[in-house]
Image (cartoon, coloured by chain):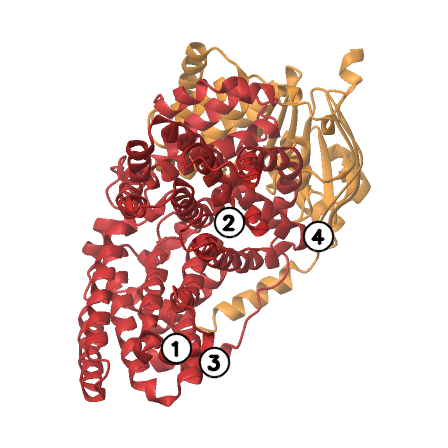
Chain colours: A red, B orange
Amino acid sequence: MKEFTILKILDKFQSLYKKSGVNYKTMRMILQIKLTMDGRRVSSVMSKNKKIDESDDKNNYIRLLLFNAFLSLFIGLIMMNKMPALKAVNIVMGINLFMMISLMISDFSSVLLDVKEKNILLSKPIDSKTFNAAKITHIFIYLIGISLSLNLIPLIIGTIKYGALFFMIFLIENILSALMVIAITALLYTLVLRFFDGEKLKDIINYFQIFLAFIFAFGYQLVGRVFDMGSLKGEYVPQIWHVLLPSMWFAAPFGILIDGNRQPFLIFLCVLAIIGPIILMTFYIKRVVPYFEKNLQKLNDNGGNISRGSENRKEFIAALVCKDNIERSMFKFTQNMISTERNFKLKVYPSLAMAVFLPVIFMFMDRGESFWDNIQTGYGGKIHLLMYISILTLCFCTAYINNSDSYKGAFIYKVLPIENPGIILKGAIKGTIFKLIIPVYLLEAMVFLILKGPSIIIDLAAMLLALLIASLMYFKISNKAMPFSLKFATADSGKLIGPGIITFMIISVLALIHILIRNNVIFVGIYALVLLVVNVILWKTSFKVSWKDIEKYS
Amino acid sequence: MVERLDSIISIKNLRMSYGNKNVLNGINLEIPRGQIIGYIGTNGAGKSTTIKIMLGILEGYEGTVEIFGQDISNGSIEYKKKIGYVPELADIYENLTAFEYISFLGGIYELDQEKLIERATKLMNLFGISAIYSRISSYSKGMKQKLLIICSLIHNPDILFFDEPLSGLDANSVMVFKEVMSNLAKSGKTIFYSSHIMDVVEKVSDRILLLNDGQIVADGSFEELKNNQKEGSLEEIFNDLTGFNEHGNIAKEFISLVEEVE
């Protein structure tokens, strides 16, 4: 089996594991097979050629890292401004923690919540401490990569600006923050597991993700304000609530050592930066893990019926939007699958939540006025055009339609008398749009409609048409296999970067046009009409797919 | 001979529930060395749950479970070095090759790698598999099952838990496997054999345990059960003890529903 460099680095820390009672040798073996497997892709039922693509998944992870490094350029720009190191690191760390939590929830929740693996490993002489250490370390290895790639440019700039001391502290803090992200996420999941069981729990976890996304999106609005509320010169004024911001903990050492700010409060925060993650992690290992693992078993309990919802309404909508019979049953099938696929929801719900929260965040950005004034006059009275940001996030919901936990069930597409696979894809995308995207869009549109009155209806209609185009385009370029036919893999997000950038550009162009013509109702009307025509053409032409095309990608 | 009479597995008043659903309602069991135990019951009767508890995969049960005279809830994993397990649903790391998986197991069981691979290759060849360096995901159902059987024996364990081990095996391999089982038992290994295929259980088991509603409702050799129930085959005894005599009517209705489609 392959030797991994990262494991050799890990070997340097083995005494740490041994001290806490972990069988390091066994853990290393588990990690080795896990990393080997991560580098491989499961060939699906649909694929004809059994030639297995070794490099695919690894490339996804590397792509994700490269993309993060690219993002870090922009984070680095913040540091170019003339500001105290305390402020700069606070912002950089805030962004970093936010990104890590989001990725932790969407990509690694499934690793944390996995119950199947126990069946394989725990019947062997592996104690649960070692088993869990392997699990945490596995996630940690990925998170530290993400954390370092996100902080790459800030690290370089900081080192040039402030010297080697910055480099050392910043590197150590990266490790501490990754540990903290794991501990916090697991702690919060444990709380959820404590209060709920069975089928309901799976739903709760999804709601919980929305909640987390919310907390972090708003929580880090505060990061920027830490300094605004102080004196005009950007000097730091201690506030007791800064204790709640981990990014402030991590920024404190820089305030002391680089800015030369000797406030006792900063020293207190600095101590928190070191003992905070350690206490959290110790608490997690000693108290949470045993409890967590025991309750995790509940996820296996499939007791209780899934609520059937209103069948008639579903039937009615299906008949309305799908002419073809096969398409209609695929439409309903997709909606049912989405409501029961845990991993799918884990990945998609956070972006649904962001779709709602992001416009709200932008509304309050850098404005001192009251909420109401903001709505009425903000952004030249066209604040509802902020919904283009929601459109961007909503499109991404279609990303994982071809993934499923029960990917092996995909043999039915081959067994059933289906002549044109395009119909299946069409039913699936329509099902997704109606299940996830339209409800969120309508909710948001309603809120704006109530706040701003009927004059914005034409804008809302145009944006809906733009949403449909963007969702379809994104689906087309990111989903090439049959729906629910591929296994979820670790670091899946990497493969979506390309399609994401293309969709981002399409939506930017549409939003730009809309903003330019925003004050002329006739132009907006024409714009909407054009979008309608484009929609009709795209929906008519996008699904001419043959079985051969599909097989290439499965 | 004294040692043979000692219980190798001892279960006292074992209860388990998922939420408010009781799966096991007080199981008591003493199993001596060298027996093949046929463990049968209806779907959802709690067979796999019992086995998973003994393997230490499931926690949160009530009662005591002792294996090799050691209470398994004491946290020691020593006993797992001497047990083998073929899971019901072929749970295995499919992305690995058979070679990688076996050498991983060898590492965990602390076996000599070189000899292990040689032995595993020979065992696989005996079962007609030569693709030791291919991904397990490319294996057929039967091949996967054979691999799982080999993996459960690779460290020469004293107790074996077989949960539906024959599923997917061809008739020839079944014959080999049955012969292997009876020889393993003769050499003093204990085999816990759980299955729904009654004729096989009837033939291979020294002792049969029937689980119904989380309780053991019958315990004895096939001969003893036959005398008690006055029925000819294990299948009939099973129907009788689980209170089932509807199969004729159900089948009739089933067919009439199938034939509704013109």
Residue position for label 3: A313
Can residue A323 be seen here? The reply is no
Q: Look at the picture and state if B243 lies above or below B229.
A: below
Quick check: marks 2 and 4 in contact, CB under 8 Å? no
Q: Label 4: chain?
A: B
Q: Are marks 1 and 2 in contact (CB under 8 Å)?
A: no
Label 1–label 3 contact, CB within 8 A: no
Query: What is the chain identity of the residue bearing mark 2?
Result: A
- The chain ID associated with circle 3 is A
Residue in the foreground of this view, choosing between A172 and A304: A172
Describe the element under mark 3 as helix, strand or loop. Answer: helix
Task: Say which quadrant the N terminus of chain A sits in.
Answer: top left
Q: Amino acid at mark 4?
A: Gly
Q: Chain of mark 1?
A: A
Asked whether B68 or A306 is in front, the reply is A306
Q: Nearer the viewer, mark 1 or mark 2?
A: 2
Residue ID for mark 1: A318
Give the labeled residue for mark 4.
Answer: B19
Measuring from the top left, give residue A64's x and y in whole percent: 31, 43
Residue A151 image point, x, y percent: 34, 39
Which residue position is annotated with label 2? A237
